[in-house]
Image: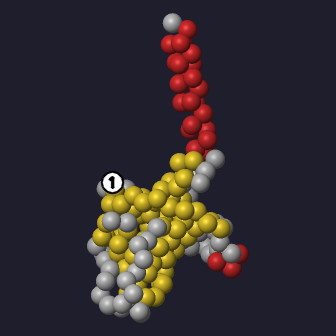
Amino acid sequence: MKTLVKSLVLGAFLLLLVPAAMACWPDDQAGFYVPGQMQVGNVLLEPGIYSVRAVHAFPGHNVLTITSSDGTKVYATVLATPHTLAPHEVQGRSRLLYVHSEEGAPSALRSFLVANSSFGYDIYARPMAARQAKVVTRELVAIAESR
């Protein structure tokens, strides 16, 4: 009986603690118009408007979710590594950095840079094939933001 009571008290404590901890790291979100096909993890996004959100589960463990613009459909969820931006890289609008190939291969999402923040989120990307010599990093600027 004591074990049951201790477990219930611990469970109630954790239910109170986790939302408070989550409030320390608000999620970063922005909407983007993607003009062409874009690879995000194992998912190929078609042209359209998407919402990108950095979800802060715990310090150092971040996930990017790509959803429909209204947030009702999740298209991709990928692990992201936070990194610090140099002061000159901080801008007033959120941005997506992606790798663009001139050879007709779809673009690949590389980073999500949050508006007015000194942090960005990098996505693991497979190494590009050696034959793709003309690879260029480009950016998309957010059309809507929320914090």
Residue 36 versus residue 121 in the image, above or below: below
Task: Tell which residue pokes out farthest to the top in this image.
Answer: 1
Residue 109 versus residue 5 in the image, above or below: below
Foreground of the two, 125 or 121? 125
| Number of residues whose C-alpha sits closer than 10 Å to that of mark 1, classed few (under 14), some (14–19) or many (20 or more) | few
Residue 93 versus residue 76 in the image, above or below: below
Foreground of the two, 127 or 136? 127
Residue visible at 57% across and 19% down? Answer: 9
Q: Give residue 25's position: percent from left, percent from top.
A: 61, 51
Is residue 69 among the parts visible in the rendering? no
Disc 1 target residue: 72
Q: Give residue 142's position: percent from left, percent from top.
A: 48, 73
Task: Tell which residue pokes out farthest to the front in this image.
Answer: 130
- Which color scheme does this rendered protein use? secondary structure
Q: Would residue 96 be found to the left or right of residue 103 on screen?
A: right
Q: Give residue 81's position: percent from left, percent from top.
A: 54, 62
Query: Circle 1 — which element?
Result: loop
The C terminus, quarter of image: bottom right
Residue visible at 71% across and 75% down? Answer: 87
Is residue 43 among the parts visible in the rendering? yes
Residue visible at 47% across and 73% down? Answer: 110
Residue visible at 37% across and 83% down? Answer: 129
Q: Give residue 80's position: percent from left, percent from top.
A: 50, 61
The amino acid at mark 1 is: Thr
